[in-house]
Amino acid sequence: MASSEEILKTLRKKIDEVDEKIVELLKQRVQLAQEIGKVKEKKGRASFDLSREKAVISRILKLNQGVFPEEALKIIYSEIIKACRGVQEKLKVAYLGPEATFSHIAALNFFGSATHFVPVETILDVFEEVASERVHFGVVPIENSIEGVVATTLDAIYEYGLKVCGEIYESISHHLLNLTGRLEDIKKILSHPQAIAQCRKWLRKKLPSVTIETVSSTAFAAKWAAVDESVGAIASLMAAKLYHLQVVAKNIEDIKGNSTRFWIIGKSEVPPTGNDKTSLIFSVADRPGALFDVLKCFAERKINLTKIESRPSKNEPWKYHFFLDCEGHIKDPKIKECLDEMQNYCVQVVWLGSYPKGNK
């Protein structure tokens, strides 16, 4: 009868054999991805196909039948797909920089580390990079679960005429960082306006007399804190690591479970995946019941609205645009019918994009 050590040795050997097969199959997958890339290049098609990636992961989860932990399998296959895409074409993606902003984290999680990331100074710069085709895609914050919509993004998506190609939700945890790790050394706090707003109560309680100033990003605040002992930055743990800062206090946000939704913007249209969202801008005539007539178009077709937001028109004082998100894809018959009927009640209807829903 075999001893426990012998059984363990045999099982480990089998695991090694499985690992060898996995690596061999991964090599084959990369080679096939390279062939697909060549075919796409000849046809002038982009290598990035989000609907295909969603379909692959959905198929893998069905094949798994719950044996391997599903969340881990999603992460593993997502990285495999992103790595294989990297051998087809090096994607360029702009984000609100510098490195270690929450936009950077969202971009990394969405596109993977094989992507070439381009940090820029403002949200409008992200739109400029995409519009000028210096990058393939951009990552911009669109709304926070506590502070609400990012007005700059809403206004820019209308003005630049780009498409929303995807979305990703990121959990947001804010940490107070500085060079020494001592609270008493902080004479001034820097961060992005949204981050400061999300930590108001903590700051009033712990540092009521300290000057607070806004800067373009949480990571820029961390860069400043890295060269000035008197400065504290509200930023991510990734920023602490990147800029060699100490954590003075963790998770200082006033409400836990805070998250930010980011849009992936580009010039391409995304095919249906079966689990999609559509974003629109529309404006209505100045008459009683105009907005009701528009919303009825959705209600009668049982189309679920996930967001509606009004923004002042930049061209006409006291006139408003409405931004709307609904479930479904523009190629779904009932969505197309709805948009066609909206034309009867709207001065303008602009389709911003249909894209796979992000996981909250």
Image (spheres, grey):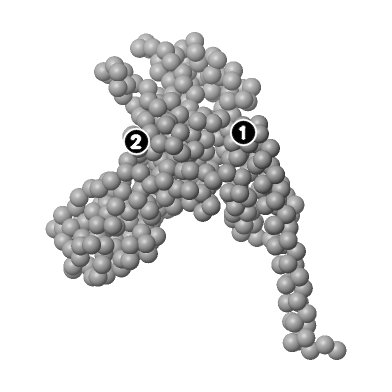
Residue 297, image x, y percentages: 53, 19
The residue sitting at 27% across, 54% down in the picture is 221
Looking at the image, which residue sits at the far right?
A: 1
Q: Is residue 271 left or right of residue 324?
A: right
Q: State which quadrant residue 244 falls in.
A: bottom left
- Is residue 252 visible from the viewing direction of this image? no
Along the line of sight, which residue is nearer the eye, 238 or 97?
97
Count of number-bearing discs: 2
Q: Is residue 35 left or right of residue 251?
A: right
The residue sitting at 73% across, 61% down in the picture is 24
Q: Earlier in the sequence, mark 2 or mark 1?
A: 1
Mark 2: which secondary structure? helix
Residue placed under numbered mark 1 in the picture: 45
Along the line of sight, which residue is nearer the eye, 136 or 100?
136
Amino acid type, callout 2: Leu
Mark identifier at residue 124:
2
Q: Is residue 92 above or below residue 76?
A: above
Mark 2 vs mark 1, foreground winner is: 1
Amino acid type, callout 1: Arg
Residue 336, image x, y percentages: 59, 20
Along the line of sight, which residue is nearer the eye, 116 or 199?
116
- Is residue 135 visible from the viewing direction of this image? yes
The reply to whether callout 2 and callout 1 are in contact (CB within 8 Å) is no
Q: Residues within 10 Å of mark 2 (few under 14, many from 20)?
A: some
Residue 117, image x, y percentages: 45, 48
Q: Is residue 156 above or below residue 224?
A: above
Residue 46, image x, y percentages: 59, 36
Q: State which quadrant residue 354 falls in.
A: top right
The residue sitting at 43% across, 15% down in the picture is 348
Q: Is residue 275 above or below residue 300?
A: below
